[in-house]
Structure formats: C-alpha cells, structure tokens
Amino acid sequence: MLPAYHLDLNQPGFIADPYSQLEHLRTEMPVFFDEVWSKIFFTHYADIASLLKDRRLGRTMLHILSREELGWPPPNPRLANFYRYQDNVFMDWEPPEHTRIRSLVSKVFTPKQVERLRAKLEAATHKLLDMAESNGTCNFVSEIAEPLPVMMIANLLGIAEADWPHLRPWSAAIVKMYELGYSEEQMQAADTAAREFMACIGALAEERRAHPQDDLISGLVHVEEQGQKLSEDELRATCIFLLNAGHEATVNGSSLGLRALLRNPAQLELMKRAAHDEDAAFLKTAVDELLRYETPLPMFERYVLEDMEISGVALKKGMEVALLYISGNRDPLRFERADELDLNRNDNPLLTFGLGTHYCLGAPLARLELQVLFKILFQRWPNLRLSDEMEFSEGFVIRGLRSLPIEF
C-alpha cells in the first residue's frame, strides 16, 4: 500500500541540490517504495532515529539466513577480493560478533584519547596550509580536505608515510561499491584496490608481530596473539575500514562545510570571529551544525530482521530500508528553521553519525579534525574566498565535492 516513487540518486542535479525534492517527499510521501532500488525509503527524522535504535533491523541478514534462503545470487567471482574485505568488516555485523571487534578498537576513539591527537592534528593542518600558501590559491578538496584526515588515521594505524599516497585512491575505489548503481569498471577498480590494500595491511601486520610499535595495528596483532578471535582477514579488514570510515566523513564534511560558510556570509563572519578568539565551545557547536546542514554521508541501509511495524508501515523480514539522513537532518518537525545554517544551534541531535549499536566509532575524531581545521583555516586565511566554480563528485551515498577552488 506504500506509494511508489523512483528517487534517481545518481542524477547530477539531485546530487548537487537534493533539498527541494526531499522537502516534497517529506510532505507528500514520507515513506515510499522504490521499485528500481527495491527498498523502502524513510525521510522523517523521527522514523529514521527510531529505526536506527531498533534491534529488529541490522546491517546484515547473513547471521540469521543464508544467501540461498534469502534468494540472493552467489557472490560475483570478479569481486572476490572486495568480498574478502567486505565480509570481514565488523561494522556490517551484528552482536555479539560486532561487539567483539568494536570493543578492541573503540578505546582508541574515545573523546579523551582523541583529544591527545590535537597537537599532531594542528601541526598537520599548518603543514598543509604552508604547502598551499605559496601559490595563493588551491583546490581545498585535494590539497587540504583529503590529505588531512588520511594523514591522521594512517598515523594512528601505523601505516608508513611511503604508503600514504595509495590510501585515498584505494579507499575511493572501494567505497564506490556502496553507491546504488556502479559500473563494471568501478567493480574492477574496487576489487583491485581491496586486494592491494589487504596485502599492504597484511605486510604491516607481519612486521608488527616481529617489531611491535605504539600504533593500532600493533595493538590488534597483540590482542590476536593473546587468544582473542581476531583472524588475519578480520585484522586487515578492520584496519581498512577504519581508514575508509575515518576520513570519508571528514573530507566531505569539511569541503561541504566550507562551501556552506562561503554561501552564508553572516555565519562565515561568526566562524571567523570564533577562530580568531579560539572559542572552543562555539567551534564544537558550529561543526555539528555544519554536519547537520550538509550531511556528508546522506543515506544508510538496514535489513529487516523480523516482521515489525513503524508509523503504520508494515515491514517484513528480509526487506531493505533506506534511511535518508540528509532528509532527517533537514526535517522541520525536528529542527526549527531546518533549512537555515545557524552555527549557534544548540538543540542539534544530528543523524550524521547514526544512532544505536552502529553509531560511528570515529565521530570524536571527525569532530576534532573539523574544529581544528576551521579554526586554523580562518586564523591564517581570514579573507578566504571562492576563486572558481566548484564541482560535485559522482555519487550520492557518499556525497562530496571534487573541487572547491579557493584563494586567500
């Protein structure tokens, strides 16, 4: 009985500005079935928040039913390396297996532990701005937004600096598989990236077994040797996942956030003043508002693990639901003046990092990275402005900019 509607997520105009269409959907059909994607879409904040916290939905169904029972085709042999990685990503598991690995890595990402990275983060930010400053102009995305979080996560994991140039291309190829609709060429690129990335982490793990260091890979290797059930592939996939998840939100959050500031002069002035005054409390609030206003990871999916009902909608076991975080974050039923950027917004329970069991492990690090980046950026370049047309990347599920040319 649900209304049928096809949301063309890959249409460039929608990627660049999805908000008017999402507003229409929230009003006219807040829950709808998309036959092309074979998913039920939810657009309202309340429904999305409720479903994220409901244990009757999960990131996978393979812990309760086989592919044959679900009627899924067998894994594509051309994606053997990608599936070797994906099948061992703990964030796509359910408890107790999800809990087992998450507990091993979560200690590194507590707000207290992350705060210890502030000095390194500030030094890395200054270094990137120094490199860009000599030219008087730069592509903010490729020269600052992308390398900064990659440097931080790679350093945390213990990946050698010589391997850093490979990390972003590997990650970018792998995450294309999370879009709805991908090409044969993208499939091949993702499988190659997964193979090379798994081999890189495997080689590092072997080194750390012989010569432990103060990094996360050494810690995970040590835990494995103490008898906990962390297999070699789990170890490799966990490290890759942390790198991928640990920078995608920050790359897109910082570039989309800067774009939003440049399009809202009054809020830009507030940010400049806070950066000059080093107003930490304001910067925390402002970063959350930027992450609400422009959601860097707009949609997540869940499987229905048992029959249930929400808001009068019957969900049957085996269905897939698509949760449009980007719509929930602009829902006027939850946020006053939802389409306005308000860096002083205090009542701001954004959906950007999820909720419940699968709440984003790297949220404290992402928030700190953005707070430090915007503080230093506007301290050093208070007259920063656009120098040319910006360009969005392809893909909606991971939504961001390919270029954001600035001068200062």
Image (cartoon, rainbow, N blue to C red):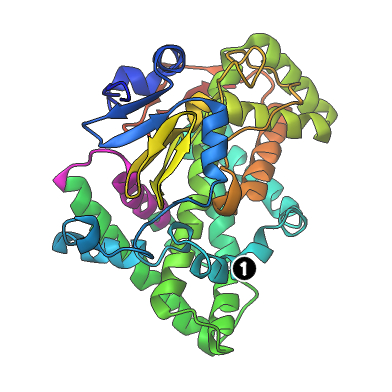
| Quarter of the rendering occupied by the C terminus | top right
Mark 1 lies on residue: 103
Tell me residue 215's x, y (percent). 61, 71
Q: Position of residue 254 (x, y in %)?
A: 56, 33
- Residue in the foreground of this view, choosing between 327 and 303: 303
The local secondary structure at tag 1 comes to helix
Which of 288 and 60 lies nearest the eye of the viewer? Answer: 60
Q: Is residue 198 above or below residue 26?
A: below
Classify mark 1: residues with Cα within 10 Å, few (<14), some (14-19) or many (20+).
Answer: few
The residue under the point 31% across, 36% down is: 39
Most common secondary structure along the magenta stretch: helix
Q: Is residue 275 magenta?
A: no
Q: How many marks?
A: 1
- Compared with 380, 357 (above or below) is below
Q: Position of residue 28 (x, y in %)?
A: 41, 12
Region rendered in magenta:
167-184
| Residue at 76 percent of width and 57 percent of height | 116
